[in-house]
Image (cartoon, rainbow, N blue to C red):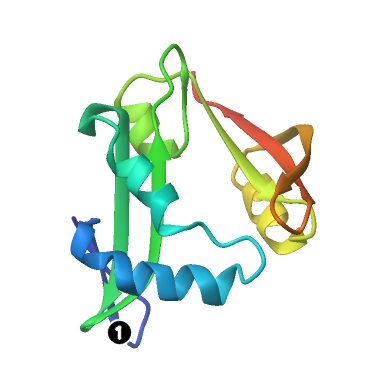
Amino acid sequence: MSARTDGQSTVRLREMKRADMAAIMALEEELFPEDAWTPEMFAAEFAQPPSRRLYLVAEAGNALIGYAGMMFTGGSQADLVDEADKRGYREVMLEVRKDNPRARRLYLRHGFGEIGIRRGYYQPSGVDAVVMRKVLR
């Protein structure tokens, strides 16, 4: 994957490996203390065929500083824009916490529209998810 420079450090993207799970779980629990995914949830994602999923990690130096994933759901939807467009999908959908206005504004600035609500989506807190869609083609 390509490297980006933010003016101070270089961030590298690469495919996620099972060996990354300890660092990913630490980030997951720090970022989402009430709604963290469990190791079993990540394992279920990894159990999907590689053609149906893509998970990446971001590293700065030797530190894992972020992660993202997408699941291709057949038909015309996927979960990340560039890869979805490259694979010929017509739209991208995602869920974002209703109580995260910064993330919602970020997605709106990048061409997503809010199309619905999934009540109580994030558990155990019960926070709603805003469903957002970007049409690619």
For residue 52, which quarter of the picture? top left
Q: What residue type is labelled 1?
A: Ser
**Residue nearer the viewer, 82 or 77:** 77
For residue 44, which quarter of the picture? top left
Which residue: 51% across, 57% down? Answer: 37
Mark 1 residue crowding within 10 angstroms, few (<14) / some (14–19) / many (20+): few
Classify 137 as above or below 66: above
Which residue: 69% across, 52% down? Answer: 123
Classify 45 as above or below 3: above
- Return the x and y of residue 111 as percentages of the image width and height: 62, 39
Which residue: 69% across, 50% down? Answer: 122
Q: What element carries label 1?
A: loop
26 with respect to 62 (left or right): right
Residue that label 1 marks: 9
Which residue: 43% across, 76% down? Answer: 26
Count of numbered circles in the view: 1
**Residue nearer the viewer, 37 or 85:** 37
For residue 133, which quarter of the picture? top right
- Return the x and y of residue 57 as percentages of the image width and height: 30, 62
124 with respect to 48 (left or right): right
> Outermost residue toward the bottom?
8
Classify 24 as above or below 137: below
- Return the x and y of residue 84 as percentages of the image width and height: 38, 30
